[in-house]
Image: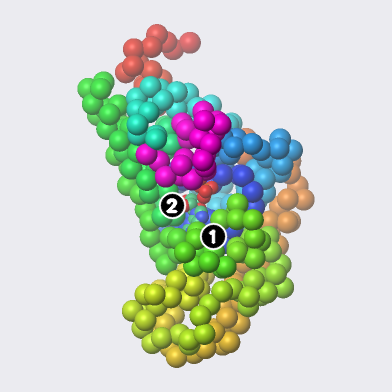
Amino acid sequence: TPRVFSGIQPSGGLTLGNYLGAMKRFVDMQEAGSFETVYCMVDLHAITVWQDPATLTRNTRELCAGFLAAGIDPAKSILINQSQVPEHAQLAWVFNCVARMGWMQRMTQFKDKAGKNAQNASLGLFAYPSLMAADILIYHATHVPVGEDQKQHLELTRDIATKFNHDYGVDFFPITEPVIEGAATRVMSLRDGTKKMSKSDPSDMSRINMTDDADAIAKKIRKAKTDPEPLPDSLDGLADRPEARNLVNIYAALDDSTAEAVMTQFAGQPFGTFKPALADLAVAKLSPISAEMSRLMADPAEIDRILSAGAHRAREITAPILRKTFDIVGMVGPV
Ligand code: TYM
């Protein structure tokens, strides 16, 4: 069976973008039954920028609660925290020696995150995509569901697999397919339709957090930036209206529908009608998840048990693949 891998950073709360662009799709692929699914909290990636230790611990457990509340079932998927499966970091070292400096320098996420003073960025932030390639390839995963912002990293994953196979004259690592599908592959900020919705945006009004209560969700949608025109009667009419387009996409993704179907339903309606409908839908879909998250968070020991069990299952896959990689490279072993 083809294997799916994907990850989310425990570097802050989950946003609606993470949920619609990633987590909800993870659940779909788990339920499709045609894949073996591995989902990961990537704490080693999170520390490429400073994380307060106690906050990192809490965010990792909260993210795990988010996965479970959204419908990831540890009996159907392998659910892990990255640092508990040491083969990720071990394979990443090998990939650091396969990947080229120039490849990393081209990464737009590095340029964005490092900002003007790239000399002061951590070495880990620079090598970030190499660890990400290791996350995927240590499982020989073939399908990776992500939002659109991860596309460039996945192309680099293919480059690393190709170069490794070529350098060592093997056909060992698969060439992975990104799975960037659905109505919400790029959820935009509620304040600016040209910017991605992000947990790091300074304005909390720009995003919906998975832990927001019903009042906060309703208020953020009511205040979301829009233009004064009613909704047009077809998708073409949204081409130059990024904020309107974003709200339609969010509605479609929450409702497991398509932007076309939402346009048919709300054609000609003003935002005064559409926004309350969207708020009701968002509250109906998100509040059971946030309620379940707080219930799970009350028992952190249970979360830790789930992650520990997941790590044991994962290592049955990752340990042999790492050993085989070391054999290919010519390293003496096993211990
Ligand atoms: P991260 O933690 O930034 O985001 C997790 C997932 O959420 C998606 N996403 C969005 N989708 C749509 N609209 C948005 N506004 C939005 N914001 C975030 C992201 O595309 C992602 O799928 N590098 C990754 C984590 C990672 C990973 C991996 C992913 C590490 N190793 C291996 C896949 C495979 C990241 O920073 O995601």
- How far is disc 2 from disc 1 in space, using C-alphas? 11 Å
Q: Between residues 3 and 164, which one lies in front from this camera angle?
A: 164
- The residue where tag 2 is placed is 149
The disc at residue 197 is: 1
Q: Between residues 99 and 106, which one lies in front from this camera angle?
A: 106
In the displayed orientation, state which residue is furthest to the front.
116
Q: Position of residue 45 (x, y in %)?
A: 54, 37
Magenta span of residues: 106-128
Residue at 39% x, 34% y: name it: 104
Mark 2, secondary structure of its residue: helix
Q: Residues within 10 Å of mark 1 (few under 14, many from 20)?
A: many
Q: Position of residue 73 (x, y in %)?
A: 56, 51
The amino acid marked with disc number 1 is Met
> Is residue 236 shown in magenta?
no
Q: Quadrant of the N terminus?
A: top left
Looking at the image, is 216 positioned above or below residue 139? below
> Is the distance from the Cβ of mark 2 to the nearest ligand 1 atom less than 8 Å?
yes
Residue at 77% x, 50% y: name it: 298
Q: Position of residue 254 (x, y in %)?
A: 52, 70
Q: Between residues 201 and 257, which one lies in front from this camera angle?
A: 201
Looking at the image, is 256 positioned above or below residue 122? below
**Does residue 111 appear in this view?**
yes
